[in-house]
Image (spheres, rainbow, N blue to C red):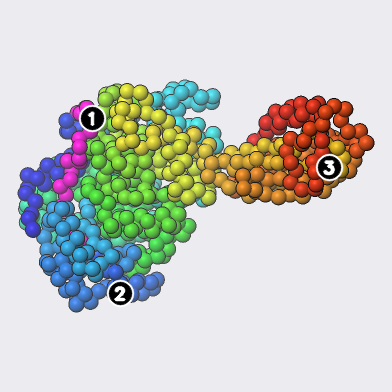
Amino acid sequence: MKLIAQGGIVRALVALGLISYQAAPALAVGKVATPTAQLQWVTQLIVKEKSSGLKPPSNGTDSTAARPDVATVQRWSAAAQLQVTYKRPMSGGAHVVTLPNVMSFADAQTVAHRMEASGQFEYVSPDRIMRATAVASDPQFANQWNLWPSTTVANGPATTAVGGANITTAWDKTKGVNSVYVAVIDTGLLANHEDLAGAKIRSGYDFISHNVYNGTPDPSSHNTVPLGFVENDPSDTPVGRDSNPSDPGDWVSNTDTTNYPTYCGSTQRNSSWHGTFVTGQIVAQHNSLGVAGIAPSVTIQMARALGKCGGVASDIIDAMAWVTGDSSVLGANGMPLPVNSPVAKVVNMSLGGAGNCLSAEQAAITAARARGATIVVATGNDGAGVIGSPANCNGVIAVTAHTMDGDSANYANVGTGTTISAPGGGSGTIVPGSGTPITSLSNTGTQGPVADTYGTEIGTSMATPHVAGVAALMLSVNSSLTPDQIATVLQQSARPFPAGTYCATHTGVCGAGMLDAGAAVALAKGNPTVHASTSASTVVANNAVTLTATGNAGLVNTITSVQWAQTSGPSVSLTTAGPDSNGNYTATFTPSAEGTYAFTVTLTNNTGATATDTANVTVTAAASTGTGTTTPPATTSSSGGGGGAIGLGGAALLLAAGLAGRRRRVK
Ligand SMILES: [Ca+2]
Ligand SMILES: [Ca+2]
Ligand SMILES: [Ca+2]
């Protein structure tokens, strides 16, 4: 097992984004083949046995019940062919063990595969280091072009942006409802920011373990990372996981870079306030202060999992499991957490690392989706043609970033698995543009929080909350949407990339197009339609007439009822049926008296939206059949014997009725 050479570590950390993209070569034309951040370091493994026999934790019992015994850990070490040390149980029946030394991601993967080959394990995954996918930019206040439509719309903003996400148009339908719950997994939240006053913020949690990076000395400096270093919240009790997800700051001092160069990189950094920025993008209030959030009326929740010098997959997985309703997640003092209810239906993860989707990540994502959650993940900022993880896991919505001009941002990863592009700001890959960033909430503190402010950032981290926010708006108009339906609607409503941009000329690698909130919410709302027709517009008395309703519930919606009603003419009894094999609904009646019969049909879908149409039938007396040549009925009625004969004049009326029937009302 080889240790990573220091020079390689530094290069890897530069590429990972610990050093701002301002320091990276600017305006590369095209994307690099693979992320230069491929070299990662790993100190832990996530282990899940096939049938452990270990008791799962349950409410009110100490987590020691779920811990494996010494013999089990020895068996794991034998499978790994090196000594692993038990660290803690995690969600989903998995466990975290510490490796004897820092190793590359590839070497850790080799150990994991070796363990899996023993046949004892459901999966073994390297506990990858994750980082926020933001890129700092020069502080400046910019207009929120990212919320604008691409073309002028009635009652819309005066200005448009080619790359705008058309959020303002979606606001005509909804700004969100507080019964839609969104979770953000990030660096924590300064919930007292002035632009969050009045926002619906529910209790979150701080998932950062006390011993992240502890146990394996920095291979470069040989210094051991102290307990509590990553969580960095000594005033919160107990140590380790706690119920306060406030952001204490994630600054990296010169002392930190000297003591822990492998873990923290070589460059001093101020606190990012990344979680507050991302949260503000979604729920900053519309209050003539600061900025406008995308879905200001939804309920938000912070699950803190990134601290000083990043975080680990095991903490992030536990955070994702808990916000989406997993009952097996351990909190403070290793005690099981109460189930998060109602569960978060949208999870924003503006974070990631390079490499394949971990089995542990995939298992957690699959389980979260089964609980109804839509997981939205940033593709990463390596400027690569390969997306990061967990964006590359199955079932997530992977979000890349574009600029104000609609070009792929030069830092944004694209490639297989990308779902959609959203505004991330900065310069384009082919069209440099103005470099305009995204504006949201921040803090003036360089270490701990000091005072509210507003800041600008660029990155796939900033693109991701656009999609999470729009998913929340979609759920606000249609609470029954499944994760798959949300992905489908987002893709079907996306706008094409502008001609000449990177994504227009590299089809299939940037997802379905540019996020369009106005179109997505309209489709999600699923306006229903219905069209009524008759088997004959004129019929002789005592012959059956069939009325047919052809309806559409609206995209991804379902029809809950189709109601027929007679509005004029001698009263008749309607025999209703449907849907038939074509999805049509019918009503049949046999009139006995001459006159004009009028009917309405009302289709209601599962959102409660209705559409109506009308149909008229003229009934003539039995003694006075038509004067011209008789013809068979235009449509055979479904019951009641032979259809009535109609004359040529009747055929003309039928056509007119068909045209009239297209006048349908939707509300
Ligand atoms: Ca803590
Ligand atoms: Ca805390
Ligand atoms: Ca505001």
Which badge, 1 or 3, is on the more N-terminal residue?
1
- State the image coordinates of residue 545 (x, y, percent, origin top left): 79, 41
Q: Is residue 611 visible?
A: no
Within the magenta stretch, is there residue 33? yes
Identify the magenta region: 26-45
Q: Write the residue at 50% across / 46% down.
A: 475
- State the image coordinates of residue 210 (x, y, percent, origin top left): 24, 61
Main secondary structure found in the magenta portion:
loop
Question: Residue 194 or 502: which is nearer the viewer?
Answer: 502
- Measured Cα–Cα span from mark 2 to mark 1: 50 Å
Left/right placement of residue 632 relative to residue 282 reads: right
> Residue 604's quadrant in the figure?
top right
> Residue 421's quadrant in the figure?
top left
Residue placed under numbered mark 3 in the picture: 543
Task: Report if the CB atoms under discs 2 and 1 are less than 8 Å apart.
Answer: no
Q: What is the tally of numbered marks visible in this picture?
A: 3
Residue placed under numbered mark 1 in the picture: 30
Question: Residue 422 or 146: which is nearer the viewer?
Answer: 422
Residue placed under numbered mark 2 in the picture: 54
- State the image coordinates of residue 645 (x, y, percent, origin top left): 82, 35
User: SS at mark 2?
Assistant: loop
Which badge, 2 or 1, is on the more N-terminal residue?
1
Task: Report if the CB atoms under discs 2 and 3 are less than 8 Å apart.
Answer: no
Task: Report if the CB atoms under discs 1 and 3 are less than 8 Å apart.
Answer: no
Question: Residue 260 or 614: which is nearer the viewer?
Answer: 614
User: SS at mark 3?
Assistant: loop
